[in-house]
């Protein structure tokens, strides 16, 4: 029988455990030894190596926990829970190694966790303040929107604001409730005004529909009219009434507008067809009047007013018979004809003035009176010379010279009159 070799200590380099004679494996800590397992009928070195590997695994877990905490992968509460869990594992670990060092390393994590908790508290406080500011801004924007008239975009924006509100964290109850009441009241005010607007809009559209239905019926009744001028004016009036009636519901408004335009287009299309035929006729009339104008303008310059007037009367009769011309040519053609007529009238007036017997008689009387007066003044001048009075001579000479000047002018005026109409010819008619 082989003798019991006695207790086996750990290897010289390992002061953290031993194997007892009965195979019990112990670990040494500051609190003393405690059994961590049994290794019966086995090599003590192998036993210690086995339990050391367990320690290594535990040490790896502590190292990974340190890394996760320092790198911020765990929140403070989760980190504290993980440390407590691992500390329990260390305290009860069935392993051989420096468990006290692992515990110290775990304790060393407390300041980091506390700092992380403080940072999280500060971050949360900052986020809550930012959330308060955002909710305040949301409430203010909603209050502004509650007074707006933008019924489509305003409703969409209020829905967006509600989603933004829901995504923000809750504040302390009193602040959160106060801001929510402001936001909710603004939404309610806007919604109530929006509903009232659409009620009024619906009433207005129904009124517009009634007006436009009446306008459409009248437009359709006028579509076959041939009273082009009056009906065109009425269609313009109907269009003004249509624009002033406002919009009906879109689908109804579109259908009514189609009917209105169809009736209007039918009338104006028929009018345009008739006008096109009339334009052809007017263009033909214009060609005739251009030809007559050429005949009238060939009378210029006027040398014989009587014959020119007779020819112009004939041209005027044919001009009237030619009928209407296009509006765009009317002013030009009438203006050219008026120039010829004005020239004939001016020539007639000049002829009449020259052949007026009363005016000629007055001019002849003036010449005769001046000739008689000059004869007397010549006798006075001869008498003054005979008397030899220089003052009398000068006065008589001055009076004679003045009357001779007047006589020259009177004879020029008489020369402007036409010769007396020969016997057998009727005197010229006075111009119209």
Image (spheres, rainbow, N blue to C red):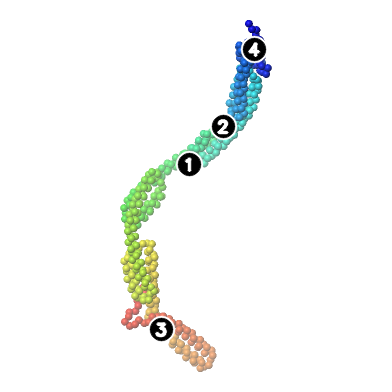
Residue 153 image label:
1
Q: Give the CA distance from mark 2 to mark 3.
A: 126 Å
User: Which mark sits nearer the N-terminus, 3 or 4?
Assistant: 4
Q: Earlier in the sequence, mark 1 or mark 2?
A: 1
Where disc 1 sits, the SS reads helix
Task: Give the secondary structure at mark 3.
Answer: helix
Which marked residue is nearer to the observer: mark 3 or mark 4?
A: 4
Q: Secondary structure at mark 2?
A: loop
Q: Position of residue 187 (x, y in %)?
A: 49, 38
Q: Whole-Å distance between the Cαs marked 4 and 2?
A: 62 Å
Q: Which residue is mark 2?
A: 172
* Residue placed under numbered mark 3 in the picture: 364
Q: Identify which residue is drawn at 66% across, 10% down.
A: 6
Furthest-right residue in this view: 12
Q: Residues within 10 Å of mark 1 (few under 14, many from 20)?
A: few
Sort mark 4 into few (<14), some (14-19) or many (20+) by Cα contacts within 10 Å: some
- Picture quadrant where residue 59 is located: top right
Q: CA distance from mark 1 to mark 2?
A: 32 Å
Whichever of labels 4 and 2 marks the residue nearer the N terminus, that label is 4
Mark 3–mark 4 distance (CA, rounded to whole Å): 179 Å
- Mark 1 or 4: in front is 4
Displayed quadrant of residue 2:
top right
Query: In this rendering, would 77 be left or right of 289?
Result: right
- Tell me, for residue 20, which label it has, or none: 4
Answer with mark 2 or mark 3, whichever residue precedes in sequence: 2
Nearer the viewer's eye, disc 3 or disc 1? 1
Q: List x then y, in percent, for residue 134.
A: 55, 37
Horizontal arrangement in the rendering, residue 280 relative to residue 47 (left or right): left
CB contact under 8 Å: marks 4 and 2:
no
Q: Identify the residue at image location x=35%, y=73%.
A: 309
């Amino acid at each position: 029988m082989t003798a019991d070799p006695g207790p086996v200590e750990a290897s010289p380099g390992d002061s953290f455990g031993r194997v007892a004679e009965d195979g019990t494996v112990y670990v040494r800590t500051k609190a003393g030894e405690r059994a961590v397992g049994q290794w019966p009928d086995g090599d003590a070195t192998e036993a210690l190596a086995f339990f050391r590997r367990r320690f290594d695994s535990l040490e790896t877990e502590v190292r990974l926990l340190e890394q996760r905490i320092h790198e911020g992968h765990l929140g403070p509460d989760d980190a504290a829970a993980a440390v407590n869990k691992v500390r329990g594992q260390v305290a009860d670990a069935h392993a051989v190694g420096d468990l006290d060092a692992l515990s110290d390393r775990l304790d060393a994590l407390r300041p980091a966790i506390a700092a992380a908790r403080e940072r999280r508290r500060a971050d949360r406080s900052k986020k809550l303040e930012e959330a308060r500011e955002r909710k305040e801004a949301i409430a203010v924007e909603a209050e502004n929107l509650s007074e707006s008239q933008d019924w489509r975009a305003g409703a969409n924006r209020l829905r967006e604001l509600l989603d933004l509100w829901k995504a923000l964290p809750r504040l302390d109850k009193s602040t959160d409730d106060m801001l929510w009441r402001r936001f909710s009241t603004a939404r309610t005010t806007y919604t109530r005004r929006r509903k009232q607007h659409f009620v009024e809009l619906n009433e207005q559209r129904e009124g517009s529909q009634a007006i436009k239905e009446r306008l459409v019926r009248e437009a359709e009744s006028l579509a076959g009219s041939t009273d082009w001028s009056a009906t065109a004016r009425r269609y313009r009036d109907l269009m003004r009434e249509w624009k002033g009636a406002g919009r009906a519901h879109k689908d109804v408004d579109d259908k009514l507008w189609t009917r209105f335009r169809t009736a209007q287009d039918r009338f104006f299309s028929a009018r345009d067809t008739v006008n096109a035929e009339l334009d052809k006729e007017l263009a033909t009339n214009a060609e005739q009047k251009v030809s007559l104008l050429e005949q009238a303008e060939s009378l210029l310059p006027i040398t014989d007013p009587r014959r020119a007037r007779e020819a112009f009367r004939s041209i005027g009769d044919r001009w009237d018979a030619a009928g209407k011309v296009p509006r765009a040519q009317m002013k030009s053609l009438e203006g050219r004809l008026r120039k010829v007529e004005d020239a004939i009238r001016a020539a007639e007036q000049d002829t009449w003035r020259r052949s007026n017997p009363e005016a000629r008689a007055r001019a002849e009387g003036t010449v005769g009176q001046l000739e008689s007066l000059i004869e007397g003044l010549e006798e006075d001048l001869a008498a003054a010379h005979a008397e030899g009075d220089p003052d009398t001579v000068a006065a008589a000479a001055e009076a004679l010279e003045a009357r001779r000047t007047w006589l020259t002018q009177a004879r020029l005026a008489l020369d402007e009159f036409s010769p007396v109409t020969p016997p057998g010819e009727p005197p010229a008619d006075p111009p119209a």
